[in-house]
Amino acid sequence: MRSFRIPTALQIQRVPLSVVLITLLASALAFGWAILDGLPLYGIVALAIAPWIPLFFFEALWDYYNYGFYALLFVFTSLQLGHMGEHTAQVLQLLVHKGDARLASGVFGRLDLELVHFIWDSGVWLGVLGCIYVLGFRNKWLLISLVAASLHELEHMFLIYLNKVDLDFYEAGGLAGVMAKGGLIGTPFSRQYLHFVYNALVVIPLVIAFWDESKRAFNVWLAKALPELTDAEKIAASAQLQRVKAKAGEAVIRQGDVADRFYIVSDGTLEVVHQEDGTERLLTTLGPGQFFGEIGLLAGRTRTATVRAKTDVDLLALDAPAFNDLVTRSQGGAARLTEEMRRRLGETPEPASKPAG
Amino acid sequence: MGIFAVALGFAIFMQVQYPPFGKVPPTATRAQWNDYWWLFALCVVLVAGTNFLVLRAAKRRQERMDKTSPEPVTDVADERLNPLRQTGPHAE
């Protein structure tokens, strides 16, 4: 039996768990208060969602910085899931009110306007097209989603024209559009149920496509630092990366310490200095996409230099077992790291008595 | 696809059990609807045309990327990709 595992790219990485728990508590309190205060449905939902917005924003921003386009797919899929939620709410309201359409406008009923539907669904259609443009044809689920989004878009293009140009006809039944019951072509589905089905047809393949992409996503800084790795190696190594932050002036590794981690710079700059006889010599500076800490791990020696943050820095770290695993598995990665180690050792003076390591 | 079957089944159940009512009943005639076939055709052309253009661009982009995509680890690749590369002989 295969074990279920959430892909690394999909895990919350930027926001600490404590902040997630505080947000959850705030959301629950806001939800409870809104119900006790008798707020309308949209007020209850808005208050429950509001605390999550900053967390979502920061996480998505971090994802964009570390996973590139995948983060946009994450935001797009999340928004579309919310849209599906709105249509689901409307259908559930119809269930509760036994089909009374006057009492079933979804959660945010004030936005139940033809123009809003048109803008949103055009965005979905163009968004799916954009995803296919960037990711290519490797993800067949996106193509299925595109077929459904295109049919849905066609429907809303038709509807917005009637709504803006021939309102009398629109109100006399034109709002059925192309495929709803009584529409131009027509099906047995009334408009509310037809659009629920349209959205399910768009969202379900989109979510599957997103899940597939989550399993393929790898950290862009790892890819920049070690472009020789294959995609499979980048994905496997990305799952092992740990986020490390350091303030300006702080030493990330110190000369003579035991080597326990390999680092990739994702933000900020650091200086590499060699200390000898109480004096420091600047060897180089490192910026985003560069790495350090490989010498001690590859050569089995202590740190040969001190690496100090010049600015506040964001680093990605691989601990020793994960780094060794990467080097063992990846011929290209090992060659690149060894090459760089040799080059750097050529720059770092060897101690007189014993290896700097 | 099981989830979609559930969604479709639920929509069919709702349509049969609780067909929506309560808004103004439709009075539009078939003749009025027939005035809008041109609009339907235009929408089909717009959507299909845009899809065609974007998918063609995507195909070309993919072909371009396939031509330049990951090359094997060679000295040439290292020279191109490694900004820190040392051009001289390496000390052991």
Image (tube, helix red, strand yellow):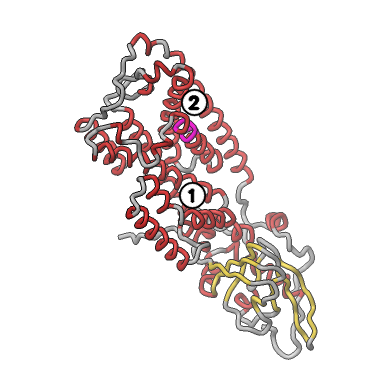
Q: Position of residue A31 (x, y in %)?
A: 37, 55
Does the magenta run of residues contain A300?
no
For image coordinates 30% across by 32% down, the residue present is A102
List the single residue furthest toward the left.
Answer: B17
Q: Quadrant of residue A148?
A: top left
Q: Residues within 10 Å of mark 1 (few under 14, many from 20)?
A: many
What residue span does the magenta drawing correspond to? A117-122
- Chain under callout 2: B
Q: Residues within 10 Å of mark 2 (few under 14, many from 20)?
A: some
Q: Is residue A347 left or right of residue A261?
A: right
> What amino acid type is highlighted by mark number 2?
Val
For image coordinates 45% across by 67% down, the residue present is A17
Q: Are marks 1 and 2 in contact (CB under 8 Å)?
A: no
Residue B47's disc number = 2
For image coordinates 79% across by 66% down, the residue present is B88
Q: Position of residue A355 (x, y in %)?
A: 69, 85
Mark 1 vs mark 2, CA separation in Å: 25 Å
Q: Secondary structure at mark 2?
A: helix
Q: Position of residue A51 (x, y in %)?
A: 46, 56
Question: Label 1, on which residue?
Answer: A74
Instruction: Report the label total.
Output: 2
